[in-house]
Amino acid sequence: MQMNQPDLFDAPAPPLDDCATLLADLGEWVEHGWLRELDRSFALFLHELDPAAGAPLLLAAALASHQLGRGHVCLDLQAALADSPASLSLPPAHAADAAQAQFARTPSQWLQALRLDAWCAALRASRLCEAGPGQAPLVLQGPRLYLRRYWQHEREVRALVGSRLAPQPVAPAAHIRPVLDALFTAPQASRDTDWQKLACALALRQRFAIVTGGPGTGKTTTVVRLLALLQSMALQGGGAPLRIRLAAPTGKAAARLAESIRGALDRLPWDALPHGEALRPHVPSAATTLHRLLGSQPESRHFRHHAGNPLALDVLVVDEASMVDLEMMARLLQALQPQARLVLLGDKDQLASVEAGAVLGELCSRAQEGHYDAATVQWLQEAAGQQPPPALQDGAGQPLDQAIAMLRVSHRFTADSGIGQLAQAVNTGDGRAAQALWRAGLDDLRSCRLSQPPALLAQDAKLRALVLAERAAPFGHAHYLRRMHTTRPPDGAAPAAWDAWAGELLQALGRFQLLCALREGPWGVTGLNATVAELLREAGLLQGTQSWFAGRPVLVTRNDYGLSLMNGDVGLTLDLPAPEPGAPPVRRVAFPAGDGSGGVRWVLPARLQAVETVFAMTVHKSQGSEFEHAALVLPDQGNPVLTRELVYTGITRAKRWFTLVGSARAQGPVLAEAIGRRVLRASGLMA
Ligand SMILES: Nc1ncnc2c1ncn2[C@@H]1O[C@H](COP(=O)(O)OP(=O)(O)OP(=O)(O)O)[C@@H](O)[C@H]1O
């Protein structure tokens, strides 16, 4: 069904044979923010390459580029024709009334004039488009149109993952079984499936594995046991210890991985392993970012490590893999030696990467149902002494299915935990169950029902209570600011005392985070940053209105290798004592040292080129972080960016308390609509 535009029937059909008209229309759409300049430039570039290329091809090229900017790997021509608002977000949500834009022709009108077969035929007829390998800038596969680079990445990921799926067990099942039995003792008494044990056994079988699961399901616990076991097997064979590396997409996620790994190492029953505690030094806990691991180079998309200069490692664990985009996944796989093992950890239900692709989600699209074939079932029986439940067995399972383990029991959230139940309800699209949980009065679920209109948010008593959190818990913004004022060392204190103060404040800052679905507007990061700052100033917790003020929390928005700061790092602006009486205080931004030492690094504000205030952050940016108290703000109008994955990701950032912030409308119909909307990203990875 074509979506009707208000002006559809009054306007003449767009001239499909007239490139000049299309290029002029692209210009108009860019001017109104419907497309990016980049999208138009790409069409212009193709027009220059081949002036004979027709308007249908140039339109498809501009739209394929537009879709890349929205996280899609390709343009699904069929979906574009069927429903352009839904599949292309054209008209965009902020301009739903297309007539207001006063375009000569809207994208929908151009699409209305096209038919799928004719559009595909026009693309196939051009030398700018090929059906597979070649040099042409566009690739058409079925109804999917790619920019060649992304088609290539998708192909590489599929091939390189595929090449690692052949069973190549690290040791015979009979050798593995006693160690796994000793490491995973808990559910022996019960008849429940030990998913962690099965995950470990699955990951020992081939050179690629995914361990997916929701928060607290034991992904880290499992992978540490896996690494200890791999190392133990390597040493038993008399060989050198394996070179193991740990990585994550952002600095924040890498720091959190390192911390969780250290915790899991402390809990590991070393005695269960043939080498006991002697193995511990051979299981690393230091984690790095993928960019650092691969050796990013300034101003270049290329890395120091690639197929020609592979990474010197035997086992690579990548945490928060849902945040890894298609291009990064391709580069990562290319940089691995064929014999190296790759283990991806992540929550398949979280929001996908900001960049194009939803690789983990797509690879795990069948994980819920298992699809373990007879050979896998036999392997699991022999190596782990357990089988997956019959419902998850499938004689026709595919090779990829055999490499994926889904952990299904949360050890962080018990069955009666509100956060756990809410995450589950949202994840299964059960809006009624989600609403019922709010009414159940569970201690870890809070509601902040706003009653003021957007323009008067700073006067909303509920929002004020959330931000200032007079009671000790759940924490609000005021928590770290009160500590900043009350625990400040005396002016003559030693540098170590200032470091300790800053370190403690950074921890306090991380206990609470306001999360927004949107960037702009009163319900977005920009509006809420201003509103929260106003509330904190009124309460006397912040002083000064300059851009840099003591107590300003900042988020790094771009990697800065010179300062060793990564996109996603959070710092806190603090005033250190003046060097001499009467001089102004020395203003610095404290960042966690990031080396696992718990130390602090001080940076001059002026050196920070890409930072923003972070009283509120987008849910996207919060991925890879957790907070004792997370509060998710929903706008009071529906918006296509509000999806089930976004709400789920927001909820699962909370460890102890989750608060839903918004008007009655936001907490009712807007939430329900969001839970019902899935993120669908066009791609051919699993096609
Ligand atoms: N089998 C188990 N039995 C009891 N507790 C467990 C088990 N596995 C993990 N835990 C506990 O659950 C918590 C979460 O475990 P872990 O950090 O391994 O999970 P995760 O899936 O990596 O979590 P995250 O959501 O942080 O990614 C830890 O406190 C851990 O001790």
Image (spheres, rainbow, N blue to C red):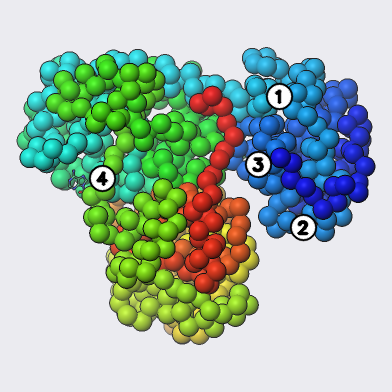
Query: Disc 1 and disc 2: Cα gap in Å?
Result: 32 Å
User: Can you give x and y, in whole percent of width and height, for residue 185 in the image?
Assistant: 10, 38
Of the residues shown, which amino acid type is indicated by label 4? Val
Establish whether ligand 1 lies closer than 8 Å to the Cβ of label 4: yes
Q: Is residue 380 left or right of residue 618?
A: left
Of the residues shown, which amino acid type is indicated by label 2? Asp
The residue wearing badge 2 is 97
Establish whether ligand 1 lies closer than 8 Å to the Cβ of label 2: no
The residue wearing badge 3 is 87
Q: Is mark 1 in CB contact (under 8 Å) with mark 4? A: no
Residue for point 36% across, 63% down: 437
* Residue 79 visible in the shown view: yes
Q: Is residue 177 above or below residue 577?
A: above
Residue for point 42% across, 16% down: 163
**Which image quarter holds the N terminus?**
top right
Q: Is mark 2 in CB contact (under 8 Å) with mark 4? A: no
User: Can you give x and y, in whole percent of width and height, for residue 242 in the image?
Assistant: 25, 25
Of the residues shown, which amino acid type is indicated by label 3? Ser
Label 2: how many Cα within 10 Å (few below 14, some 14–19, many 20+): few
- Is disc 2 placed on a helix, strand or loop? loop
- Is disc 4 placed on a helix, strand or loop? loop
Q: Is residue 419 or residue 670 the one in the foreground? A: 670
Q: Is mark 3 in CB contact (under 8 Å) with mark 1? A: no
User: Can you give x and y, in whole percent of width and height, for residue 367 in the image?
Assistant: 37, 33
Q: Is residue 108 left or right of residue 527?
A: right
* Residue 604 visible in the shown view: no
Q: Is residue 264 or residue 167 the one in the foreground? A: 167
Label 4: how many Cα within 10 Å (few below 14, some 14–19, many 20+): some
The residue wearing badge 1 is 138
Q: Is residue 224 above or below residue 489?
A: above
The residue wearing badge 4 is 409
